[in-house]
Image (tube, rainbow, N blue to C red):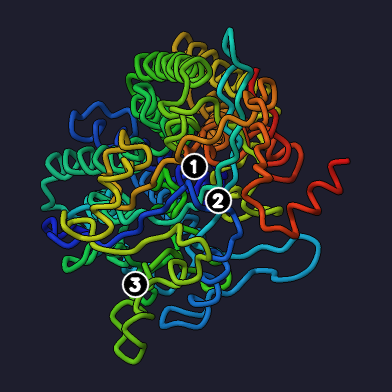
Amino acid sequence: MNPALSVVLFTTLASAGLGALAWLGVDLALGLRVVAPARVVVVLAAALALLAGGLLASFWHLGVKTRAWRAFSQWRSSWLSREAWLSLFAFVPALALGAHALGRWPALPYEATAVALVLLAFATLYATTRIYTSLTAIPAWSRAPVAPAFFMLALAAGACWTLALTAAPANANVFAAVVAALWLLAAALKIAYWRRIDTQALPATRESATGLGRYGHVSVFESPHTEANFLLREMGYVLARKHGKRLRALCVGAMTSCAVLFAFAAARPGSTMVVAMLAVLPATFAVFVERWLFFAQARHLVTLYYGADPRAVADQGRPGFASSSPAP
Amino acid sequence: MTMLPPVAPVKLGLVIDLDTCVGCHACAVACKQWNDGGQFGPLPDERAFGKDPLGVWVNRVHSYEVTAPATANAPAKHMTVHFPRSCLHCEVPECVTVCPTGASYKRASDGIVLVDEDKCIGCKLCAWACPYGAREFSEVKGTMQKCTLCVDRIYNETLDAADRQPACVQACPTRARHFGDLGDASSAVSKLVAERGGYALMPESGFRPVNRYLPPRPRRDAAAAATNPAPAPAETLDAAKLPPLLRWLDRVLSR
């Protein structure tokens, strides 16, 4: 799949923002005071800026931007539409809590509002994962580790932002230890996911896709078109496969370095803010690369109708002809 | 509305005969031509000319080589199969339900899957959802394009009755494409499917495609004929039965 920058940026930024909102909601609802009351507004503003930035990036992805409002209409069937609504709903308790923190709304039942914020942040993240996991045409995306890894990374990246903006947090050592564990868990889930997509074959073959398997092995004799088309550019994208191994290593390296940083912070609670500030860069890098690979390394079933190995399509620059030899 | 309508008894679709398709791309060209000028047109190209032309075609003709492996007493058999690929107008199309805007819809009356170009925001999610590659995005229009089953032809009363069928069907020089109601067991296309063992593509997708493909008929075994030529039939010329002039010629030439 083509890792469109707009979509990669959207999920990277919005999930970090939603992760931060979820943490803040938990913190306020349980009264943990990890985020000092004076800093609530700062964290909220940063989280909402990340979410809004992500939404703006997704808006940039659209072919006809002036009709973006129409995406709210089909919430009864479409996870994309549900995600759009939920991401907007999440602003409501967040802004209410911001008003409360600024002293503008003292009567706000802020614990209940904080719980609503947590639920909406999680619901939005869930809707985003469902957009991907429900697409059976891209089998890699319906693998079991996809949704948990997405949640782990959202919470881990959100925690980086939350702590980076919080001076002298209470319970910092416990929180930092949890975040370190989240990064390790996320790395383990991604490794499990990559192992699965590398070893498990697609559920269909060119023989089953064409229905010609009853006659024997099916190979591409001639492509329907000599140049690329939308399908090959969007679904047959394979540029990152060449550097897949290195990018995966960089991604896991960045996640592990975040885990190490937060383990250090757990041992020295006074350093949490500085450590979290240092971790924001590798955290964002890790999530960005992970999302890039999530697209670039996912094979769409339509590629079965084209070259034998979609790698050949990209490497040769000409679809079809490159892969006309029968598979060994 | 992207909720699917109740399953309609009418299921308009195509039946494509892989036995007679010769891969001439006339259907694809006729499709492009009609849809560039029909009610849904234009169907513009991003780059129609030049080194790397790029544009939307909603009907594509693949060509495959099918190889049956060699057995102990027969060499490997090869067969070329031309394979037109377009929207299958699925009964449970995921491209419709994923659409956030309601632009992608399935008609309740005849099951045709269409895109409302005035609503489409060009998010491309429907193209991601389709394992058959039925949808192509137009960078020029910013919206998704797909086969309309020539809905602007098949009900068009300004056309002669004989012309009220999809452009691809009408253009096919080998009559490898058939159009009709696959929901009606007594229709000509349904009978053809039953007679020839027509099949759906990737039924495991669960989307229940309506279009059917007719498998190639068994080919003459050219390889076996080449290695084991049958003896030429003995020539039998009964000179006694020839007219006198030819009988005389036969006698002269036989000398």
Do we see residue B132 in this rendering? Answer: yes
Disc 3 is placed on an element classified as loop
Image height of B235 relative to B120, above or below: above
| Callout 1 crowding tier (Cα within 10 Å): few <14, some 14–19, many ≥20 | many
Taking the spot 26% from the left edge, 37% from the top edge, the residue there is A122
Chain for numbered disc 1: A
Q: Amino acid at mark 2?
A: Leu
Q: In which quadrant will I find the C terminus of chain B?
A: top right
Taking the spot 23% from the left edge, 35% from the top edge, the residue there is A28
Chain for numbered disc 3: B
A29 displayed left or right of B49: left
First in residue order: circle 1 vs circle 2: 2
Mark 1 lies on residue: A302
| Residue at mark 3 to residue at mark 1: CA–CA distance | 24 Å
Q: Are marks 1 and 2 on the same chain?
A: yes
| Residue at mark 1 to residue at mark 2: CA–CA distance | 8 Å
Mark 2 lies on residue: A231
Taking the spot 54% from the left edge, 23% from the top edge, the residue there is A275
Position of residue B85 measured from the top left corner of the image (x, y, whole percent): 48, 52
A156 displayed left or right of A256: left
Mark 3 lies on residue: B116
Q: Are marks 3 and 1 on the same chain?
A: no
Position of residue B113 measured from the top left corner of the image (x, y, whole percent): 30, 62
